[in-house]
């Protein structure tokens, strides 16, 4: 059995800018920050940030760009997509891999619950519930 599910709840670290592929498909890239907190054996509090690259397509992208802004909390469920590419540095070619989470579902989080209740019906109507096209990102140049 294979399972590819990611659940991320954190704060958006960039402006959710709606873009389109050359064929006209809307998408939005997000960077979401999560924090890991723990107590070290010596009793000191420890904190580490982890940044996640996410992408939303079609109506999901349009709704996210419309209703979210930098710093907003968001809760997403998605699946990992792997991109393999090469880069040339000083005449040498290197293989690279980049991972991102394709957003399958999302919801408002944190202090936006009241606003979320006001817009929930609108968001539910706007979001296309069909599964994402797995090769949709073939049109994009994967950054190094």
Image (cartoon, rainbow, N blue to C red):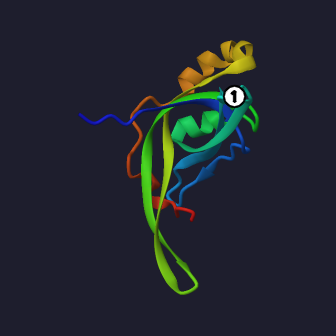
Viewer can see residue 109: yes
Q: Is residue 50 left or right of residue 56?
A: right
User: Farthest bottom residue?
Assistant: 91
Q: Quadrant of the C terminus?
A: bottom right
Q: Is residue 137 above or below residue 96?
A: above
Q: Residue at x 47, y 79 (%)?
A: 93
Can you give x and y, in whole percent of width and height, for residue 137 in the image? 46, 54
Snapshot quadrant of residue 21: bottom right
Quadrant where the N terminus lies? top left
The residue sitting at 39% across, 45% down in the picture is 133
Q: With 35 as the anchor, is 4 left or right in this view?
A: left
What residue do we see at 47% from left, 74% from top? 94
Whether residue 89 is situated above or below residue 75 in the rendered picture: below
Residue 102 drawn at (x, y percent): 48, 41
SS at badge 1: strand
Q: Position of residue 103 (x, y in %)?
A: 51, 37
Q: Residues within 10 Å of mark 1 (few under 14, many from 20)?
A: many
User: How many marks can you see?
Assistant: 1
User: Residue 63 or 84: which is nearer the viewer?
Assistant: 84
Of residue 35 and residue 47, the one placed in the foreground of this image is 47
Q: Is residue 65 visible?
A: no
Residue 23 place in picture, x, y as percent = 49, 58
Of residues 137 and 1, the one nearer the viewer is 1
Q: Identify which residue is drawn at 67% across, 12% down.
A: 117
Residue under numbered circle 1: 73
Q: Residue furthest front?
A: 42
Identify the image quadrant of residue 113: top right
């Amino acid at each position: 059995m294979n399972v590819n599910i990611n659940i991320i709840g954190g704060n958006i670290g960039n402006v959710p800018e709606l873009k389109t592929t050359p064929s006209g498909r809307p998408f939005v890239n997000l960077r979401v920050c999560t924090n890991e907190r723990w107590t070290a054996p010596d009793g000191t509090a420890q904190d580490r940030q982890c940044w996640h690259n996410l992408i939303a397509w079609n109506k999901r992208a349009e709704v996210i760009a419309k209703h979210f802004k930098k710093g907003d909390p968001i809760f997403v469920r998605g699946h990992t997509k792997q991109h393999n590419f090469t880069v040339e540095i000083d005449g040498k070619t290197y293989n690279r891999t980049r991972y991102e989470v394709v957003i399958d579902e999302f919801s408002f989080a944190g202090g936006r619950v009241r606003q979320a209740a006001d817009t929930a019906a609108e968001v539910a109507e706007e979001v296309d519930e069909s599964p994402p096209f797995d090769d949709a990102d073939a049109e994009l140049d994967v950054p190094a």
